[in-house]
Image: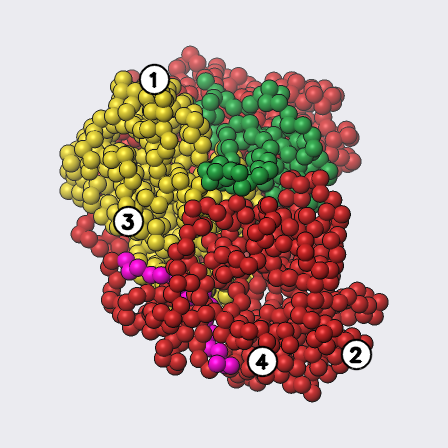
Chain colours: A green, B yellow, C red
């Protein structure tokens, strides 16, 4: 189980937290002005990258505070954790830990990587 | 069909020391271009190639797989097959699949070991009962064979189950006798074997890096073996579909989550049906080898690591130890994870998109295996005719704009 | 040739115990494993193989055992127990597995005769027809023959979990682990050592390979080290504990057996599952010997060389006096020395290496002791009836000769035990020197030491450990390690030996557990299964309970030869956790049965029990479903009685499970306007309102009553099951979307116990209970509330109703709840007050046409669908979900809408969940889907109307009022004729509510 460093409580097991999906997706200020398609984009569409992902977490079984994180979804490594009112860190701050564009080695099965 | 398998062919080969078996499929280098490129060599992708060649006369096809055939979710699931979905659209799609399953071994002359041992969904509270009775009635009107079982009938079918002495007693179950399990790898292999026979190129260890488009029209794909031209590109890459879609400028409403499963050590048969429990997130069946195959829940965050949280395994094991008290003396042999792509309404997408010649078959969440033949069949139709089959019309991308969702959260066996 | 007792073994007592195997009693020593005990008694045949039912014996001396799985009859029939690690005790009762009728005569062995037909993947190619045969004939047959052990008996474990947070975890208390530990003694690091055996020492106790350390014999050195560790302030040791799982962020799972070598006391925790969090993990878990494939390499009597040596050194028994040793490396000479020390002698020493590569010391030692020596030779195969009798040797000149022997000990080299390292997602690489994979790049804070890192040189060990642990800034430790073998490990690649027999039945096994032969691998590759994962799945190679621990690298070797590729290019299959089979009971721990999930009870719970309530589970809550007035009263009778009495006089419901959320702050009004569909701006203080909460998709998520104290203070109720979700939903939007709003949320569900009194006599009852409150309609109108003090606690009474009757909802502090409840009953007696449960609540609200979230709604229903247009604050610019209500599909007029339904024949009953159709009858077997308009969401027999009333969600329901349609029945073909009516069956004018 991965550990998450809650900015308010410190490192805790992931099961204490709930994930809130992609971060920095602001609710439209004037929903009525949007087309069905654009509104649908806001309600149902979230990016799903393999690699660097800006996401939200809430410390459900702790302080109940929401916060943001940058995580590499190909390794589940947290690259940065920051409070909601902190600025969105620039992507250039992070180096993805991906080994290849998709992460899997060209031989082997995916879970077990062999170094050539 | 050139390579015929039967008991006789086994005897014949036994005499020649099993040294003369033919290759089931070739591993060619990719050609410069194809009519259709299918990205993803799992069951859905290989099946799509098979039906395109067989039913639509398109044979200049390549199936491109970044790893090995059937190495994604086709080889990682708990092999459950059923069609007892609530909404008409889903029931029709999944039952189309079950019907194809019923003849697939014979059709492909490759034994899928589709075993119609029945699938049981347990009810643990009054709300479950109401939901299931509604589903059974809807299923019945859709021509499906789902029925209600009371506790006594459950105990007769699954004597090792503890129905009373547990925190959430078993109050009944919805049971679909035509449901069951199949040998997961065989599906990929069978489709590979027969589509390759019809001229489909199966290219393994070749990664599609991006989809090339020009003026909203597909041009081909860039791969680790170079650029390959194509008139049509059909993406069936489960957890990685949205990553690929992005390269063509298409956004899909998918989230990729870890889903875990485990097996026990093999024992003599104790459970001859499939038992699923939504309330306690555990489903169990026993393979022909004797291993108990157990499905766990999804994790609540996106991940491509094929590794879920240990707490999810613990949750599931807690439930099965209570539900089946003999598990108190059994052991977990293996545990693994897959990546499932989940749609907001827990229903798949089998659809065209804004880019001409680009098609997606994705969003199967935790339940894609059962749909393999049906999904492949209607997807082939969609790709060949550039318009959906009646059965997959509703599973389009527009539903996320107009609101015509097919909300199957209740039917998915695990909480999304 | 029989077993010899090694009296010098210090790890085994010479105290005799009795054990039973397959019904026969045998003597063993306290400390024996099942395997060592059976070997001591010269029992070599111990089980039957999985597929061909071939006779099998004990192959190894540890966790890697592929063959010797037994059932422990006196431990709830525990199946598939490894004989090589299960310790015996006096009275243990063991049985062999997978044989019928007996171990020596097994009918299933007919499969061996048919084996040429049962080639790799045979089941994919047959059993396909005729239709129905798979289900009825083939599969039941296959299932019966498959499986291994018999099912165990029901067992409720008392196993527990224990958490550890340490700086350093050392996996393995062998030589490398102990050197590392000695370096860490009395440092600032908190260290935990986990050792699977009950003795420390690893290779020092399991073999004869190390002679001395710093001049001390190894036993003394281990003892000294253990004393130093136990005397330290910072290092703990867990013995009999096996690390099985290596998760992300250095989280490891280890299982401790608390009853090693003892009869289990089922009143105690027999297993402890350790969950270990570390900063650094030191893997010092050693290596595993691999075998060599040759003809009949599965016969009982074939045993890995290092395992044979371990039986002598660790368990004090040499399984045979004169085994044949077959090796491709320099390690096996220590086994010869062990045997000579016991006065035994190998009958042959066969070394596949070139004569010049074989160490001079080895050659000298063999000739000095007159041991027949076959350099540049190999074992072609062995034969015998259920045991090794003859060994065939192919000499350097390719001639085959045979010798008599009853045991044969192959050694194919060693694999660093990288299972845990790869579980941690570390990268491995191929090493030509040791001919195996070894760890390369760690993914986590993982350090590998000793043979698991691929270092087989004892002389280099200390410098390796000093170097790798230098970041910890501990003292250097340099030990003089003297060995019985040449320290420079030498090996020649050899995976299988070719057989001279051309028989179809001749077999060289690559996976003993799953009966996979080298021929199967060749065949699978011929058929196109040339990816290593395909091979594994097609042949089932390395998918057994041992997960191919002694054979997986061998299969890579064989495959690479066939494919003419390097092994590193072939790749390897995935190592999946756990390292060894892990008890389900231990994973589950104590939190099962009554501890599975908390039971939430209201403060009135005990009263309900006393009054014969039948409970239902609503989420974690236990809620009274109905009350039995007398013993034989059925649920139907009780519900009819409760409902009738409530409408005639008064009823009371324990509504404490309702979620309650307090919303306070400067911007509370604005927040509430955004969260709910309703408009709260014009709502007067001290009034309440029924309200709906939507998701952003426009679908109803929850409902409740909102009490407005003023613009800065609201109290909301939620459904019982929806409380956590609603609270989280509010918090989310407050924190992430509207942090500028000054609003504070507080869950007060447990702070107030809630009673709902309703019925025509409700006013009279509450007036008696709260005599200082004016309950008159003028002073206390419908949908208003009053707050007051009750015995120095806050209390609130709201005039609201979920039954359609005059009703009051009382919110009271839990400490006074029960006494108030009883006081209400004291006064209520005169007014025929009845307690009712959830079922009656549902019935009463259905009569009134009120919806239940989760019953009428299912996540696809908008407020408009249930005729709640009036609840949408249309003038509000925005609220959550508003925009979704105008999408083309949600705005459709033919959506499913809420209606009431009554049967035309008032004696008929409509079942919930059934569907509304246009046809009178259904075919007995439905082949083509039948169109339906919607479904029955609620249905009850109304005691007040004396017929069935139903609520339904049906297409264009609003336009179908008065229409005659049909409702299906669960099984029948004749549908029930019904009429579509308004869903409000009682008091549509709301007279009862408002008077």
Q: Nearer the viewer, residue C380 or C373?
A: C380
Residue beneath disc 2: C771
Q: Are marks 4 and 1 on the same chain?
A: no
Q: CA distance from mark 3 to mark 4?
A: 51 Å
Residue beneath disc 3: B96
Determine the residue positioned at 46% across, 38% down: A37
Secondary structure beneath dot 1 equals strand
Which of label 3 and label 4 is nearer to you? 4
Q: Chain of mark 2?
A: C
Which of label 2 and label 1 is nearer to you? 2
Which of label 2 and label 3 is nearer to you? 2
The answer to whether any part of residue B217 appears in the image is yes
Image mark count: 4
* Residue C808 versus residue B95 in the image, above or below: below
| Contact flag, marks 2 and 3 (Cβ < 8 Å) | no
Secondary structure beneath dot 2 equals loop
Relative image position of residue B122 (x, y in whole percent): 45, 60
Choose the circle earlier in sequence order: 1 or 3. Answer: 3
Q: Nearer the viewer, residue C833 or C188?
A: C833
Q: Residues within 10 Å of mark 2 (few under 14, many from 20)?
A: few
* Residue C241 versus residue B272 in the image, above or below: above
Region in magenta: C929-945
Residue beneath disc 1: B227
């Amino acid at each position: 189980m991965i550990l998450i460093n809650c900015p308010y409580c410190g490192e805790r097991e992931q099961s204490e937290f709930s994930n809130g999906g992609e971060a920095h997706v602001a609710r439209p200020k004037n929903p009525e002005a949007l087309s069905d398609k654009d509104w649908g984009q806001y309600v149902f569409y979230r990016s799903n990258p393999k690699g660097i992902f800006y996401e939200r977490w809430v410390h459900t079984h702790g302080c109940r505070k929401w916060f943001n994180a940058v995580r590499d979804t190909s390794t589940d490594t947290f690259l940065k954790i920051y409070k909601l009112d902190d600025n969105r860190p620039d992507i250039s701050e992070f180096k993805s830990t991906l080994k290849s564009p998709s992460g899997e080695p060209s031989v082997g099965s995916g879970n077990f990587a062999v170094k050539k | 069909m050139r390579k015929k398998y039967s008991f006789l062919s086994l005897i014949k080969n036994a005499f020649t020391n099993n040294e003369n078996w033919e290759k089931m499929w070739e591993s060619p280098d990719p050609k410069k271009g194809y009519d259709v490129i299918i990205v993803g060599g799992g069951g859905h992708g290989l099946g799509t190639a098979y039906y395109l060649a067989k039913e639509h006369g398109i044979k200049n096809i390549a199936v491109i797989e970044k790893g090995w055939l059937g190495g994604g979710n086709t080889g990682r699931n708990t092999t459950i097959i059923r069609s007892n979905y609530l909404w008409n659209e889903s029931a029709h799609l999944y039952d189309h699949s079950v019907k194809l399953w019923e003849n697939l071994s014979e059709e492909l002359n490759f034994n899928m070991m589709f075993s119609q041992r029945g699938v049981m969904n347990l009810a643990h509270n009054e709300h479950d009962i109401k939901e299931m009775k509604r589903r059974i009635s809807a299923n019945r009107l859709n021509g499906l064979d789902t029925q209600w079982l009371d506790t006594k009938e459950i105990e007769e079918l699954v004597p090792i189950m503890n129905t009373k002495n547990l925190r959430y007693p078993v109050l009944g179950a919805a049971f679909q006798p035509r449901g069951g399990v199949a040998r997961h790898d065989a599906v990929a292999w069978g489709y590979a074997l027969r589509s390759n026979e019809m001229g489909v190129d199966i290219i393994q260890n070749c990664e599609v890096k991006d989809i090339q488009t020009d003026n909203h029209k597909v041009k081909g794909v860039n791969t680790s073996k170079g650029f390959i031209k194509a008139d049509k590109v059909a993406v069936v890459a489960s957890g990685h579909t949205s990553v690929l879609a992005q390269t063509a400028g298409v956004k899909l409403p998918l989230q990729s989550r870890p889903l875990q499963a485990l097996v026990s050590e093999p024992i003599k048969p104790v459970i001859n049906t499939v038992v699923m429990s939504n309330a306690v997130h555990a489903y169990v069946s026993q393979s022909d080898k004797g291993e108990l195959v157990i499905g766990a829940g999804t994790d609540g965050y996106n991940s491509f690591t094929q590794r879920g949280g240990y707490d999810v395994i613990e949750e599931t094991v807690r439930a099965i130890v209570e539900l089946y008290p003999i598990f108190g003396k059994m052991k977990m042999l293996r545990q693994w994870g897959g990546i499932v792509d989940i749609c907001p309404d827990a229903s798949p997408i089998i659809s065209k998109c804004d880019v001409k010649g680009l098609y997606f078959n994705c969003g199967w969440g935790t339940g894609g295996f059962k749909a393999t033949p049906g999904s492949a069949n209607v997807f082939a139709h969609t790709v060949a005719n550039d318009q959906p089959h009646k059965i997959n019309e509703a599973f389009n991308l527009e539903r996320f704009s107009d609101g015509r969702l097919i909300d199957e959260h209740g039917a998915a066996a695990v909480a999304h | 040739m029989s077993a010899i007792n090694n009296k010098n073994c210090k790890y085994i007592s010479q105290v005799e115990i009795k054990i039973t195997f397959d019904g026969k009693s045998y003597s063993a020593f306290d400390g024996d494993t099942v395997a060592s005990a059976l070997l001591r008694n010269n029992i070599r045949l111990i089980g039957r193989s999985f597929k061909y039912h071939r006779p099998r014996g004990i192959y190894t001396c540890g966790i890697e055992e592929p063959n010797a799985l037994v059932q422990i009859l006196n431990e709830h029939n525990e199946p598939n127990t490894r004989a090589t690690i299960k310790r015996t005790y006096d009275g243990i009762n063991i049985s062999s597995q997978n044989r019928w009728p007996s171990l020596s005569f097994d009918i299933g062995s007919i499969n061996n005769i048919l084996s040429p037909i049962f080639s790799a993947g045979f089941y994919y190619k047959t059993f396909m027809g005729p239709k129905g045969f798979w289900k009825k004939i083939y599969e039941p047959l296959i299932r019966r023959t498959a499986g291994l052990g018999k099912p165990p008996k029901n067992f409720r474990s008392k196993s527990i979990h224990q958490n550890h947070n340490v700086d350093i975890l050392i996996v393995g208390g062998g030589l490398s682990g102990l050197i590392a530990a000695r370096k860490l003694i009395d440092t600032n690091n908190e260290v935990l050592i986990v050792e699977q055996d009950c003795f420390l020492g690893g290779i020092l106790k399991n073999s004869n390979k190390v002679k001395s350390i710093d001049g001390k014999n190894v036993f003394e050195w281990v003892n000294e080290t253990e004393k130093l560790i136990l005397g330290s302030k910072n290092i703990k040791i867990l013995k009999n504990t096996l690390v099985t799982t290596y998760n992300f962020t250095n989280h490891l799972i280890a299982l401790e057996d608390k009853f090693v070598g003892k009869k289990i006391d089922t009143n105690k925790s027999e297993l402890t599952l350790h969950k270990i969090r570390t900063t650094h993990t030191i893997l010092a878990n050693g290596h595993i010997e691999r075998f060599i494939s040759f003809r009949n390499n599965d016969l009982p009597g074939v045993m890995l060389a290092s395992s044979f040596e371990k039986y002598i050194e660790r368990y004090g028994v040499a399984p045979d006096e004169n085994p044949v040793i077959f090796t491709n490396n320099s390690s096996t000479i220590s086994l010869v020395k062990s045997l000579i020390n016991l006065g035994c002698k190998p009958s042959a020493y066969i070394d596949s290496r070139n004569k010049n590569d074989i160490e001079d010391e080895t050659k000298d030692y063999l000739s000095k002791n007159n041991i027949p020596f076959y350099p540049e030779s190999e074992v072609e195969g062995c034969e015998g009836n259920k045991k090794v009798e003859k060994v065939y040797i192919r000499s350097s000149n390719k001639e085959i000769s045979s010798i008599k022997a009853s045991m044969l000990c192959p050694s194919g080299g060693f694999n660093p035990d990288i299972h845990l390292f790869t579980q941690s997602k570390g990268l491995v690489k191929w090493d030509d020197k040791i001919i195996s994979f070894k760890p390369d790049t760690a993914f986590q804070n993982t350090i590998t030491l000793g043979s698991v890192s691929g270092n087989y040189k004892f002389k280099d060990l200390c410098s390796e450990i000093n170097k790798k642990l230098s970041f910890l800034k501990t003292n250097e430790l340099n030990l003089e390690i003297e060995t019985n073998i040449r320290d420079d490990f030498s090996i020649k690649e050899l995976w299988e030996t070719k057989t001279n027999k051309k028989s179809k039945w001749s077999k060289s096994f690559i996976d003993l557990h799953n009966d996979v032969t080298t021929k199967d691998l060749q065949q699978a590759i011929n058929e196109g299964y040339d990816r290593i994962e395909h091979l594994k799945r097609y042949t089932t190679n390395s998918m057994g309970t041992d997960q191919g621990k002694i054979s997986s690298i061998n299969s890579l070797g064989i495959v690479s030869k066939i494919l003419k590729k390097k092994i590193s290019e072939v790749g390897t299959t995935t190592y999946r956790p756990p390292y060894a089979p892990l008890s389900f009971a231990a994973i589950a721990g104590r939190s099962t049965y009554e501890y599975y999930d908390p039971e939430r009870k209201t403060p009135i719970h005990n009263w309900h029990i006393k009054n014969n309530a039948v409970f239902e589970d609503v989420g974690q809550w236990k809620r009274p479903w109905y009350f039995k007035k007398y013993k034989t009263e059925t649920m139907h009778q009780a519900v009819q009685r409760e409902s009738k009495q409530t409408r005639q006089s008064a009823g009371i419901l324990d509504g404490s499970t309702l979620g309650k959320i307090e919303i306070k702050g400067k911007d509370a009004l604005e927040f509430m306007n955004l969260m709910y569909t309703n408009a709260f701006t014009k709502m007067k203080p001290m009034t309440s309102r029924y309200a709906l909460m939507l998701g952003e998709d426009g679908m109803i998520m929850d409902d409740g009553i909102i009490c407005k104290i003023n613009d800065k203070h609201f109290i909301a109720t939620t459904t019982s099951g929806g409380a956590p979700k609603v609270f989280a939903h509010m918090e989310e939007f407050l924190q992430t979307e509207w942090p500028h709003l000054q609003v504070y949320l507080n869950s007060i569900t447990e702070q107030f116990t809630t009673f709902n009194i309703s019925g025509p006599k409700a006013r009279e009852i509450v007036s008696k209970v709260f005599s200082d409150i004016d309950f008159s309609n003028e002073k206390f109108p419908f949908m208003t509330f009053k707050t007051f003090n009750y015995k120095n606690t806050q209390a609130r009474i709201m005039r609201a109703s979920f039954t359609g009757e005059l009703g009051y909802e009382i919110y009271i502090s839990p400490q006074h709840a029960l006494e108030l409840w009883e006081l209400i009953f004291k006064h209520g007696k005169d007014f025929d007050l009845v307690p009712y449960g959830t079922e009656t609540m549902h019935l009463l609200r259905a009569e009134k046409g009120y919806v239940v979230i989760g019953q009428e709604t299912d996540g696809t229903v908008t407020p408009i669908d249930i005729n709640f247009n009036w609840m949408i604050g249309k003038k509000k610019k925005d609220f959550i979900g508003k925009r979704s209500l105008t999408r083309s599909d949600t705005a459709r007029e033919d959506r499913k809408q809420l209606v009431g339904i009554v049967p035309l024949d008032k004696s008929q009953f409509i079942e919930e969940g059934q569907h509304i159709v246009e046809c009178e009858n259904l075919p007995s077997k439905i082949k083509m889907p039948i169109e339906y308009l919607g479904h029955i969401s609620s249905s009850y027999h109304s005691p007040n109307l004396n017929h069935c009333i139903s609520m339904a969600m049906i297409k264009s329901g609003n336009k179908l009022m008065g229409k005659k349609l049909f409702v299906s029945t669960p099984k029948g073909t004749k549908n029930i004729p019904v009429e579509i009516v308004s869903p409000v069956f009682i008091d549509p004018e709301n007279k009862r509510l408002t008077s």
